[in-house]
Amino acid sequence: MTKRFATRLALVATMTVLVTPAISAQQSDDAAPPPPKPGKPINTGDVLSGELNAMKVRDVKNGGKKVATYQITSEPRRLPPPNGLCNLETGPETFQLVPNGDTQAAQLKTFAGKEISVKVDEVACASDPGQMSEAVITKWSIIKKQ
């Protein structure tokens, strides 16, 4: 009888050891953080601030020539319809600045690696090959710091 009791006790102990981690893992899955909220909207005329990064990428439209590309990293922002969140959970965090001419390109070059603010006049989700950001700002102007 004692042998049968010891066998049953060992079986219960083994089951307890095996089941306890599964229960605690299930409880930790239930306590997962809530999904992130979409960023605040960005509309025409709004100001976008962040660090300006400079990159060299190959321009697929001009025979693969390397060109300077500039990108602002910011908090997540929602774009106006129909672009919305750019197929992202919270909205884009990286915005490529497209210079309209050599003057704007030279302006951006001086601010590379620094915090800047730009007034957004036209923004859309990235869609062309070679775009290194989640969204593209095609019309913009730098806001001078006071």
Image (spheres, rainbow, N blue to C red):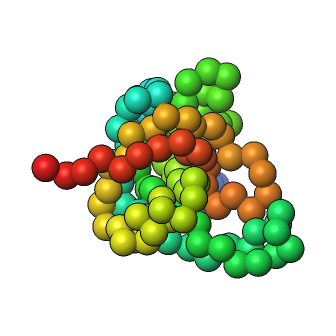
Question: Which residue lies most toward the left here?
Answer: 146
User: Is 111 displayed left or right of 146 in the figure?
Assistant: right
Which residue: 47% across, 44% down? 140
User: Is 137 displayed left or right of 45 in the figure?
Assistant: right
Q: Is residue 6 visible?
A: no
User: x, y percentage for residue 92?
Assistant: 54, 43
User: x, y percentage for residue 100?
Assistant: 57, 53
User: x, y percentage for residue 106?
Assistant: 45, 69
> Residue 88 versus residue 36: which sits nearer the camera?
88
Question: Which residue lies most toward the right here?
Answer: 63
Which residue: 82% across, 75% down? 64
Which of the 4 image quadrants contains residue 11?
Answer: bottom right
Which residue: 45% across, 38% down? 120
Residue 47 position (above or below residue 54)? above
Residue 39 position (above or below residue 22)? above
Q: Is residue 122 visible?
A: yes
- Please give the count of numbered marks on the rendered protein: 0
User: x, y percentage for residue 5?
Assistant: 57, 53
User: Is 81 displayed left or right of 73 in the figure?
Assistant: right
Question: Which residue lies most toward the top here?
Answer: 81
Which of the 4 image quadrants contains residue 66?
Answer: bottom right
> Residue 57 versus residue 28: which sits nearer the camera?
57
Which residue: 74% across, 74% down? 58
Which of the 4 image quadrants contains residue 52?
Answer: bottom left
> Residue 4 versus residue 52: which sits nearer the camera?
52
Residue 11 position (above or below residue 58)? above
Residue 81 position (above or below residue 93)? above
